[in-house]
């Protein structure tokens, strides 16, 4: 049975509103490879450790400007529901080299709740998380210390080829909204959804212990920019603006531990 987490329906209704912007700007392609290690614990629990690197193609694609370390623990209550704490540590307080480019903060603890269930021959997944992005650099702390909520919706299907090889194509969309607690009256009005990411991927499982996932994504930062006017006073830019960044990624995953080969093991999603 399909269960929608709180906010999923509202997210679908708000996507069209955020897409209808006065101005759009698209930056150069970003490369975001990642290596992950998943340690299988007794039952269906996991410890996850991942490291990514960030590179802009307009710099030749050979220089990595920064990266991020992520760690987490996930406990499965049953085959449909799981939860766990997470922590992301960035190399640059102002980089935001994680799931959403541009989110300031290099120390981000959080907690997630995940639900997955079948829709016909497909699997529909939902991931709801709340996090607090903090900066250890004083120059970013005034703007960077923000609590936010994230909701990801995904749809995938697995295809088997022989005894080991499996392919899992998947589509997902995730939105991030800052949690605003009594913002000051003189602060700029912000959009309801601050970041969004549409992603398409193909997970390739070579064996129960090794898989890799090439993916493409279009990340969008939704802002209200300062209006700009021409010499006649007509607006030419600013206002509701979408800053878009195409991203290419490759995730390489290793499943470790003596419990990894259990026949009834629940497999973590390719995008944690």
Image: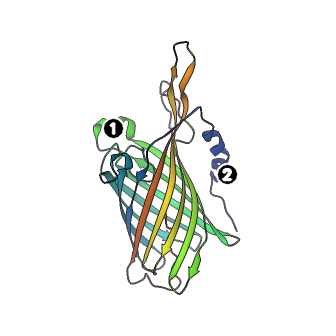
Viewer-nearest residue: 7 or 218? 218
Q: Report which quarter residue 27 is drawn in.
A: top left
User: Residue 174, percent across and down?
Assistant: 55, 53
- The residue positioned 57% from the left and 64% from the top of the image is 170
**Mark 2, other Cα within 10 Å: few <14 / some 14–19 / many ≥20:** few
In the structure shown, which secondary structural element does the residue marked by tag 2 occupy?
A: helix
Position of 218 relative to 120 (above/below): above
- The residue positioned 43% from the left and 81% from the top of the image is 260
Identify the disc placed on residue 140: 1
Residue range highlighted in magenta: 179-190
Position of 220 relative to 214 (above/below): above
Residue 215 part of the magenta-drawn span: no
**Mark 1, other Cα within 10 Å: few <14 / some 14–19 / many ≥20:** some
- The residue positioned 44% from the left and 49% from the top of the image is 29
Q: Tell me, yes or no, if residue 21 can be seen here.
A: yes
Q: What sort of colour scheme is used for the picture?
A: rainbow
User: Residue 11, percent across and down?
Assistant: 63, 48
Please give the residue where the numbered disc 2 appears in the rendered image.
9
């Amino acid at each position: 049975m399909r269960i929608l987490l709180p906010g999923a329906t509202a997210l679908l209704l708000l996507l069209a509103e955020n897409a209808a912007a006065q101005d759009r700007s698209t930056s150069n392609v970003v490369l975001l490879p990642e290596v992950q290690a998943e340690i299988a614990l007794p039952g269906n629990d996991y410890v996850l450790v991942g490291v990514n690197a960030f590179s802009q193609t307009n710099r030749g694609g050979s220089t990595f400007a920064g990266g991020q370390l992520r760690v987490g623990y996930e406990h499965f209550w049953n085959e449909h529901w799981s939860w766990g704490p997470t922590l992301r540590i960035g190399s640059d307080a102002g980089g935001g080299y994680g799931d959403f480019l541009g989110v300031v903060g290099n120390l981000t603890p959080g907690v997630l709740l995940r639900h997955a269930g079948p829709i016909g021959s497909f699997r529909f997944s939902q991931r709801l998380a709340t996090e607090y992005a903090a900066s250890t650099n004083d120059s970013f702390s005034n703007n960077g210390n923000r609590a936010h909520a994230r909701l990801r919706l995904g749809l995938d299907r697995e295809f088997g080829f022989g005894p080991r090889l499996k392919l899992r194509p998947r589509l997902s969309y995730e939105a991030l909204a800052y949690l605003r607690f009594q913002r000051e009256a003189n602060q700029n009005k912000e959009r309801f959804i601050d970041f969004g990411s549409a992603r398409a991927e193909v997970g390739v499982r070579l064996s129960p212990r090794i898989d890799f996932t090439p993916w493409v994504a279009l990340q969008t930062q939704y802002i209200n920019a300062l209006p700009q006017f021409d010499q006649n006073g007509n607006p030419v830019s600013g206002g509701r603006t979408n800053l878009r960044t195409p991203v290419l990624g490759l995730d390489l995953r290793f499943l470790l531990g003596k419990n990894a080969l259990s026949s009834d093991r629940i497999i973590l999603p390719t995008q944690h």
